[in-house]
Amino acid sequence: MSNNFWTVVGFTVRNKFKGKAFTITTVIIALIMSIGINMPYIISQFSSGESNATAIGYIEKSEGSGLFSEKQVAAMLSDYFNAAEKPDLKMVPFADTGAQESNEKILKEAISDGKIKGYIEFAPNAGTGFPDVIYKSEKLMEHGNTQALKIALQAIKTDSVLKDAGLTAEQKKMLNDPIEVNAVQITTAEGAGSVGQGKSNSQQAMDMGVVYVIIILLFMAIMITGQMIASEITAEKSSRVMEILITSVSPLKSMFGKIFGMFIVGLTQVLVYVAVIIINMTLPHNAEPLAALNIRLSDIDPVLLVYALIFYLAGYFLFATLFAAVGSIVSRTEDLGQAVLPITMIALAGFYICMFGGLNNPDSMLMKVSSFIPLFSPYAMVVRLGLSDPALWEVWLSIILLFATIYVAGWLSARIYRAGVLMYGKRPSFKELRKAMKAYKV
């Protein structure tokens, strides 16, 4: 009987690997990832030699005096975008007809013919001396084009003013050079923190990357592998195979054998996807942009990595035991989705709390409380470890609570599993399930 656990593990893994659905799904996701990673390069090949700048029309005035006249500002805008290495916009001039309505009609016809995407008009502003610019197009929320125009107009206005200020080229450079502010994470109590003492910007960025990866991988493992565990148990139960298995293997070994087997299957999928990412990122057209990001794996905090792995594994096995218990009390696969919905909602809640609240404010009261709730702590404490500086006792209290919950959930799930797999027909009530659980020992 000592080898029964590994027998169940081997059976689960082989059964999943032999399935066409698993192989096809893995290959399709790998292909989608490859296409996504190489999409910028693919687009660049199709648009080779073509300008990506958006064409913006304007009326080229023949007359105009003053530093910030309509004619002068339009010319400076055109020069600004022409001088850029990769301009966002391209200014397209149209001859002035002498009438506002005729000018606008020409510009609208140019939009209809696809020559331009929009056009700009100028309105005098006596208060600032710099004309107001109105951008017109058929699309709503043209934030990208308006922002590019705003930046360009601010730049030419500043340059024009500085020309008359009598500044030297060196003084202009000093004025325009950006100011750098370096952030360093510290701890206020010596020995109180587990991670996060004196981290540079690059180290903090790598920690943020680790937090993102762990949270997303845990969420995917819970959503995908947990569902597979529940559906596998329900399928075996509906086909009556479970009646044979349960007589030769103890419920605890059977349940955890399936959980561990599915963990190996899920881990294999993750390794395949990681290999696909690495292979695609090392291709020549992707390697150069990646090198420019100056990513150094040595900047990853090893303590954070260890704790993140502990919480990832603990979170996976906690939710996996719950999915296995629910799967054992469902007789038909059609009813499985509704049965696992509460667990799915809890997993979603923990994920959303961290992604949309914790990453921006890891020291909030919600995150602190969530890091001690076992169903949320695999997400919340990883965020706090990576982006904040929790005390060592907080980290280990969270781990102890999490492992204690796994023990209780495993024991309870095994009893539910042992009773539920032999109960067919409608989903058993809590009273029927409790009575059946008392009749069996784990």
Image: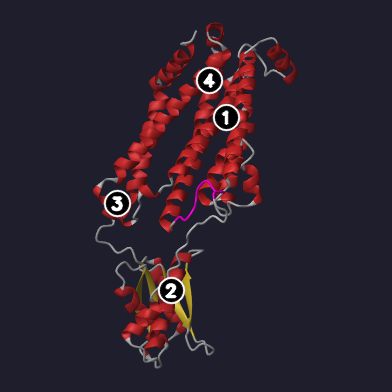
At 39% from the left edge and 93% from the top edge, which residue is drawn?
Answer: 65
Residue range (magenta):
191-199
Q: What residue would you read off at disc 4? A: 256
Q: Position of residue 321 (x, y in %)?
A: 57, 25
| SS for callout 4 | helix
What's the residue type where badge 4 is placed?
Phe
In the rendered image, residue 307 lying in the magenta stretch gets the answer no
- Residue 277 is left or right of residue 313, and the answer is left
Q: Earlier in the sequence, mark 4 or mark 1?
A: 4
CA gap, disc 1 and disc 2: 51 Å
Badge 4, how many Cα within 10 Å: few under 14, some, many 20+? Answer: many
CA gap, disc 2 and disc 4: 60 Å
Q: Position of residue 149 (x, y in %)?
A: 43, 73
Q: What residue would you read off at disc 3? A: 41
In the rendered image, residue 194 lying in the magenta stretch gets the answer yes
| SS for callout 2 | helix
Q: Quadrant of the C terminus?
A: top right
CA gap, disc 4 and disc 1: 11 Å
The residue most toward the right is 431
Q: Earlier in the sequence, mark 3 or mark 1?
A: 3
Q: What residue would you read off at disc 1? A: 318
Q: What residue would you read off at disc 2? A: 151
What's the residue type where badge 1 is placed?
Leu
CA gap, disc 4 and disc 3: 45 Å
- Residue 363 is left or right of residue 51, and the answer is right
What's the residue type where badge 3 is placed?
Tyr
Residue 335 visible in rendering: no
Give the number of the mark in front: 2 or 4: 4
What's the residue type where badge 2 is placed?
Ile
| SS for callout 3 | helix
